[in-house]
Image (spheres, rainbow, N blue to C red):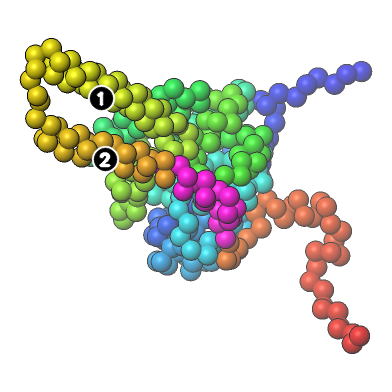
């Protein structure tokens, strides 16, 4: 007799929450207990992974104290500041839950939205991503630049990156497995989420005020990340160079024909000094711009072929959901601390 297929509505998934942090000691001390309380109401198997991206504040001592009081906490300290994208990658690769939740450490992602996101997962969504309703916490310039970025990165691209969707999302285990298979070093996570595909749905949310301190990710950081995203997921700059070269060649040919025709028809010799100087400066600028854009692509190829790891972990505290998996695979004796065997001389 065939057993009925299990639906997600009847499943009780284990839940991993990944939080990258950089100089967020005060926020972590107040937010993590609240996050854990909400997550425990949603699942009996929970782990909360905090990835310390080279913080210079009191994050280490705060996390050591919290890990002693909360066995569900996992603390990963990276060897230096690698950036948010590698920190997210470290947390995603360390997560063992059936469902993985990504949140920020500044308190702007409302934990109250997680039950609705999990409900969407139970209804069949593999990815549930949160979309900002407003950007009141950003300047007018940053809002305009963000809009232009999404238009440019999605221009002629088969993979469309949802506008105003950040890292706040919930993902099924198969999505996490797919992300972990992507080996690239220049990581733009918003693009990678879209590239792997799967059944995705959006939930609107209003960002909360920052719990404490100020953002470490300003306008320059946003521009750098946007540049990485454009080069990683769009060849629009290269196509723009091709179109510009063609247009400029046609204009130069047309201008040359006009000068020759005017000389033979009207007999007027056109003074060429100013034309030559302006033309040389213009085309030199175009060539340098083109070389610079090509160099950015080549530089990223150079970074990829070196195959350096995306991050290095200098310290880990807590086992999280990895401990039950080890207990299931290893006998009880293998999990106990054994005395070191003596070294025998050869």
Q: Can you name the residue that lies furthest to the bottom here?
A: 345
Query: Residue 264 colored magenta?
Result: no
Quadrant of the image for the N terminus? top right
Looking at the image, which residue is at 82% across and 78% down? 339
- At a point 52% along the width and 30% down the height, the residue shown is 194
Which of the pair 145/245 is nearer the observer?
Answer: 245
Q: Alpha-carbon distance for marks 2 and 1? A: 14 Å
* Residue 343 occupies quadrant: bottom right
Q: x%, y% of residue 226?
A: 38, 40
Q: Position of residue 77 (x, y in %)?
A: 53, 62
Q: Which SS class for mark 1? A: helix
Question: In the visual, does 303 lie left or right of 335?
Answer: left
* Residue beneath disc 1: 252
304 in the magenta segment: yes
Could you tell me if residue 29 is visible in this image?
no
Q: Is residue 294 left or right of residue 44?
A: left
Q: Position of residue 218 (x, y in %)?
A: 31, 49
The answer to whether 271 is drawn above or below residue 254 in the figure is: below
Our reading of the magenta stretch's main secondary structure is: helix
Q: Magenta residues?
A: 296-312
Residue at 58%, 35% (x, y): give it.
171
Q: Which residue is mark 2?
A: 284
The front one of 91 and 336 is 91
Q: Earlier in the sequence, mark 2 or mark 1?
A: 1
């Amino acid at each position: 007799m065939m057993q009925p297929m299990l639906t997600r509505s009847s499943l009780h998934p284990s839940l991993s929450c990944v939080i990258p942090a950089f100089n967020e000691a005060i926020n972590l001390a107040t937010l993590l207990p609240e996050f854990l309380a909400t997550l425990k109401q949603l699942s009996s198997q929970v782990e909360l992974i905090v990835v310390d991206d080279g913080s210079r504040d009191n994050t280490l001592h705060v996390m050591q104290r919290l890990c002693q009081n909360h066995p569900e906490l996992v603390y990963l300290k990276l060897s230096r500041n690698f950036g948010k994208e590698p920190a997210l990658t470290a947390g995603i690769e360390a997560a063992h839950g059936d469902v993985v939740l990504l949140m920020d450490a500044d308190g702007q992602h409302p934990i109250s939205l997680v039950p609705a996101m999990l409900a969407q997962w139970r209804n069949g969504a593999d990815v549930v991503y949160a979309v900002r309703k407003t950007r009141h916490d950003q300047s007018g310039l940053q809002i305009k630049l963000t809009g232009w970025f999404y238009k440019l990165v999605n221009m002629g691209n088969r993979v469309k990156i949802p506008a105003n969707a950040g890292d706040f999302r919930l993902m099924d285990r198969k999505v996490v497995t797919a992300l972990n298979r992507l080996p690239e070093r220049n990581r733009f996570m918003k693009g990678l989420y879209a590239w792997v595909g799967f059944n995705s749905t959006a939930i609107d949310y209003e960002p909360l005020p920052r719990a404490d301190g100020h953002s470490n990710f300003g306008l320059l950081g946003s521009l750098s990340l946007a540049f990485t995203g454009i080069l990683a997921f769009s060849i629009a700059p290269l196509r723009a160079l091709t179109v510009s070269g063609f247009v400029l060649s046609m204009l130069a040919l047309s201008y040359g024909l006009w000068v020759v025709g005017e000389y033979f028809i009207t007999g007027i010799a056109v003074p060429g000094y100013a034309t030559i100087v302006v033309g040389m400066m213009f085309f030199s600028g175009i060539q340098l711009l083109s070389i610079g854009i090509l160099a950015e692509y080549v530089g990223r190829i150079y970074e990829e072929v070196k195959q350096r790891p995306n991050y290095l972990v200098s310290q880990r505290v807590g086992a999280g959901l990895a401990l039950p998996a080890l207990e299931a695979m290893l006998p009880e004796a293998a999990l106990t601390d054994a005395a070191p065997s003596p070294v025998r001389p050869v």
